[in-house]
Image: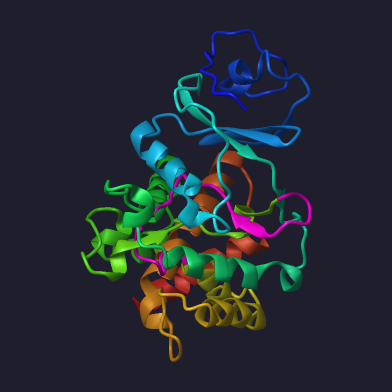
Amino acid sequence: MRERTVSAAEPAPPAVDRALRGLVTGLVQDIEVLAERSDSTVVRFGDTVFKAHAPGTDREALAQRVGVAAHPLLAGILLAPLPLSLNAVADGRPVTAWPYGEPVARHTDPDAAPWEEAAVLLARLHAIPPAGPAGGRALPPMRGPAKAAAALARMRAAGRPDPAVLRVWAALPAWARDEAPPPDTPRTRTLCHGDLHLGQLVRHPAPYGPWRLIDVDDLGVGEPAWDLARPAMWFAAGVLEPEVWARFLGAYRAAGGAAVPADGDPWPYLDVPARALAAQTAAIAVAKCAEEGRVLDETEQAVLDTCRRIAEVS
């Protein structure tokens, strides 16, 4: 696919978010909208996926992250991008292009989900020295703490700040609240995904190829335990079965993952990131309910209850 710089001023086909209409006009008409959120819009045409990133995205940092995904050292770990110029914009938002991969089915039984595959990919990612794919430049920091801070800000803006979530958040160290850099140690110079969940896995080539990690928006250098924190938090909340958590953690350790020791208690390493993810997830749930005028569903309530248990012992 040749490089193309696109302006959002071009006419647009209907049913596609305005952020991407300029890009797809003149290329395609038959478009499937895969995701529409405030921070991104993703559309598919055939075997190509276009993503319009969040308004205000740091384009230089995004270019570095996309470059990491394209580097040979990450082959077989991250889905590699297609050669679209990073000057491509839609409504002022940078656009990247990717081959289509088959995602984890929305209603997959958790017992059948690719937890072990995700764990092995994380372990392999954490083993890549950042200096290799960085090409001599310092990579940006992993954005997990920044996303957590944004979730707390969203909850406050929604006008319903939950006291337990605020207590859990306040008890975290400054680096986990994105108020300071993490301690500078060899451990925190690890290449991290930054937002690991099952929605970040696809099979490529679709539909039966090997699993790959996608979404480089939060990729960077930081604390590797953050990448294990979401499944750890779901386990602590009782949403993820102990057997599934054991499979995930066991596969990560067997693959030589650097975030936790090969044996023994992993929680001294997972505790802070898991508490941060509990606060982040609960804050998003509370904000969504306030914005949509509804009550928490069962899963959202489980995470909020977890925050309340944490707050009681903090």
The answer to whether one can see residue 34 in this image is: yes
Rendered location of residue 56, percent (x, y):
39, 30
**Which quadrant is home to the C terminus?**
bottom left
Examine the rendered structure and indicate whether residue 220 appears above or below residue 121. Answer: above
- Disc tally is 0
Q: Is residue 217 magenta?
A: yes
Rendered location of residue 306, percent (x, y):
51, 71
Residue that sits furthest to the front in the current view: 72
Is 33 in front, or is 191?
191
The answer to whether one can see residue 296 in this image is: no
Rendered location of residue 246, percent (x, y):
60, 83
63 relative to 242 in the view: left or right: left
Examine the rendered structure and indicate whether residue 56 appears above or below residue 246. Answer: above
Is 277 in front, or is 192?
192
Residue found at x 66% / y 14%? 25
Residue found at x 59% / y 8%? 10
Q: Quadrant of residue 97?
A: top right
Residue found at x 49% / y 26%? 85
Residue found at x 31% / y 56%? 131
Q: Is residue 298 magenta?
A: no
Q: Which residues are magenta?
A: 205-227
Main SS, magenta residues: loop
Rendered location of residue 256, percent (x, y):
47, 78
Q: Quadrant of residue 275?
A: bottom left
